[in-house]
Image (cartoon, coloured by chain):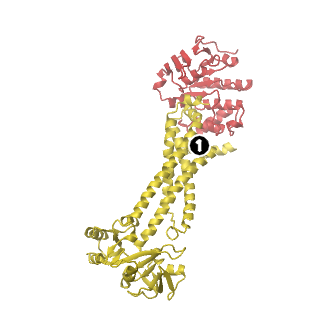
Amino acid sequence: MIVDRRRRRGGLSFLRLIFRDLETKKVRTGLTAAAVAISVMAIVTLTVVTDSLQKSAASVLQTGNADFTVAQKGAPDLLNSVVTETQVAQITSTPGVQSAVGVLVTTTRLDASHPVFLEIGVSPNALQTFGVQVLTGRPYGALAPDEIMLGWQAADSLHKHVGDTISFDHSTFRVVGLYSIKQVFGDEASMLPLIPLQAAERKPGTVTLIAVKVTPGTSIEAVRHRIESEHPNLATVRLASEYGRVDRNITFLNAARTGATSIALLIGVIIVMNTMLLSFIERIREFGLLRALGWSRQRLVSLVMGEALGMSILGAAGGVALAFLLTAALAHLSSLQGLLEPQYSASTFLIALYSAVGIGLLAALYPCLRAAFLRPGDALRRE
Amino acid sequence: MDETPLLSARQVTKEFVSGHRALDSVDLDLRPGEWTAVTGPSGAGKSTLLQLFAALETPTSGRVLYRGRDLADTDVDAYRRRSVGIVFQLHNLLPHLDIRENLEVAMYGTHLGRRARAARIDALIHDVDLVEQQGRKPPQLSGGERQRAAIARALVNDPEVLLADEPTGSLDPAQVQRLVALVERHMADRQMAVLMVTHDRDVAARARRRVVLDHGRLTEPDVPVPVGPQ
C-alpha cells in the first residue's frame, strides 16, 4: 500500500532523495543548519540594528517638509555640524530655492523612557515654512528662553499639556503649544526658539542644518549641485542612504557592519565546511557506490550542493527567527531605547537567504571537489 | 552465439600503491550470452578483476576493452550505468533507502520514463521474491534478502554484462536456483554476458566457462566447457 502510494506520487525524484538524505541524518542536518543559523542571525541582527540606527539618525534630517537638507560635509556627527547663518542667507538667495530654514538640533536625556530627547531650535516665523502645524496653544516667542512646544506624541508619552512645565538641562520650560510635523521622530521631539537655544548651547549665529525647499518646477538635483559647488564645506542629503555624507559615525557604523558581517560569513563557512567535510568522509563509501552505479560527477556534486542548499535554507529560517528575538531583546536595552526600532522588510529576508545560501555553497565547494574527483574503487575499499 | 568479445582483458596487470600485485598479465574475454565463473583462493585477485571490468579501477598496465575500445577512452559513467551491472560482495545497498528506492537510485540518468522505470522495478522485485519487503530498508532485511536486492539492482538497467562477486553466498539452495534461473533468463533474452566470482561449485558448474585465478594469474586455460545439467 505504501509503495503504491509512492508510485502514484512518481517515485523517488532527485529532489526527494536530497530531502531523504537530510531527513535521515537529522543530527548532521540540525548541527549544520544551526551553524548557518548563527551566522545568519549575526548578519541579520547587524543589518537590522545598523539600518534602524541609521534611520533613526537620518530622521533628524527628514524632519520638516524640506526637499533636501544641507549640513556640514564630513562632520563626525550630525549634531556637531556647524552651518553659519550667513550661509543660510546665501542659500536662501540661491536661484531655485523657495525657502531655507536654519535649524539647530541638540539632544538631552529626560528619563529612562526618553534617553534621547530631541530639541529642535527654529525661529517662530519659520515654523510654518518648516512644516510645523500648531495643534493647541500658540507658538513660542522668538526670544522667550523658557517657552517650549512639544510634539503631540512627546506630550502624550510625557503626559504634558499646554500650560504644564517641563524641566531638563537645569532649566524649566513652560509648554505653550503642541505641534504636529507629520513625522514620527519630529512629533516625539520638542521645539524651542532658535536664538535662546543657540545661546544655551553656546552656538550663537550657527545652526546644525538647513531645510531647503525648491521652487516648484525646479530640478532638485540641479539646486543641490549648485549649492554644493558654491559651498564646498557643505553637503546636501536627500535620502537616508546619503546620510553618511554629513555624519562620519554612520560611515564608520557601516564599515563596522561590513567587517562584522564578513567575519560572521567566514566563521559560518568554516564551521559548515568542517561539518560537511566530516560528513563527506563518513559517507565516502556511499558516494563511491553512487559513482560505481554510473552517477556522473555532475550528479554527485548536485547531490552534495543540494543538501548544502537544503541545510542553508533551514539555517536561514532559524537565523531570521533568532535575529528577531535578539533585536527585540536589544531594543529593550535602556541605552538603545528610542534609537533602535527594528524593522523587518523583504530585504531583511533576502539578506538572510543570500547569506545562508552563500555560506552553504561556499562551504560545499571543497566537499564537492572531493566528491567530483572521488575514485569509486578507492572509496569502496574504505572501511 | 556471438563470438566477438564484449569485454576483454589484454595483458592486464594491477598493482596497488602498497606494492601488492593483485593481477598479473591476465587475458580474458567475455562474450555476449556467455557465463564465465571465476574461482580461486582468497586474495587471488578475483574482486580486482571484476572491478577492472566494471571500470572502478584502472589497470597498471595492459588494457580493458569494451567492444574493442579501450575503457580509458570510454565515457565510464555511461558505461557503468548502462552496460554493466555489479553485484558487490558486501551488497553495498544504501541503508537509508528502501529496496525500491535503492533500485530507483541506480536508474538515475537513464532515459526511461517514470512508468517504465516503475514497471521494470516491479518485475525485478517480483523476480527476486522481494515484493513484501520492497518498502523495507537494508538493515531490516536478512542477508539473503539484501543479496537478492543487490542482484535486482544490478539487473535493473538491463546491462550487457553482469559482474557478480559471490552473489549466492547468503542464499539458501532454493534461492540459488531461482537466482541462477533469473540470470540465465536475462542471458537468453538479452544475450547478457556474466562474470561471476563464486566458491559455490554447483553455481560454477552452470557456467559455460570456468577460470581459476591464483596469485593474480589465470592458472587454468580460458577454455569453454560444455553447458548442461550437472
Of residues A41 and B26, the one drawn nearer to the viewer in this rendering = A41
Of residues A36 and B99, the one drawn nearer to the viewer in this rendering = A36
Give the left or right position of residue A168, taking residue B177 as reference.
Answer: left
- Residue under label 1, please give it: A17
Number of numbered discs: 1
Image location of residue A113, percent across then percent down: 54, 74
Of residues B78 and A188, the one drawn nearer to the viewer in this rendering = A188
Give the left or right position of residue B168, taking residue B193 as reference.
Answer: right
Image location of residue A298, percent across then percent down: 49, 38
Colour in which chain A is shown? yellow
Image location of residue B169, percent across then percent down: 69, 24
Q: Chain of mark 1?
A: A
Please tell me in which quadrant of the rendered image residue B40 appears: top right
Colour in which chain B is shown? red
- Placement of A338 over or under A158, stated as above or below: above
Give the left or right position of residue A237, taking residue A270 as reference.
Answer: left
- Placement of A98 over or under B81, stated as above or below: below
Give the residue type at disc 1.
Answer: Leu
Which element type, helix, strand or loop, lies under badge 1? helix
Give the left or right position of residue A143, taking residue A368 as reference.
Answer: left
Please tell me in which quadrant of the rendered image residue B45 appears: top right
Q: Residue at x 35, y 76 (%)?
A: A207
Image location of residue B29, percent across then percent down: 54, 17
Q: Residue at x 33, y 67 (%)?
A: A73
Asked if one can make out residue A10 in the rendered structure from this viewpoint, the answer is: no
Of residues A182 and A249, the one drawn nearer to the viewer in this rendering = A249
- Placement of B223 over or under B170, stated as above or below: above
- Placement of A250 over or under A27, stated as above or below: below
Quadrant of the image for the C terminus of chain A?
top right
**Mark 1 crowd level (few <14, some 14–19, many ≥20, 10 Å Cα):** some
Quadrant of the image for the N terminus of chain A?
top right
Asked if one can make out residue A143 in the rendered structure from this viewpoint, the answer is: yes
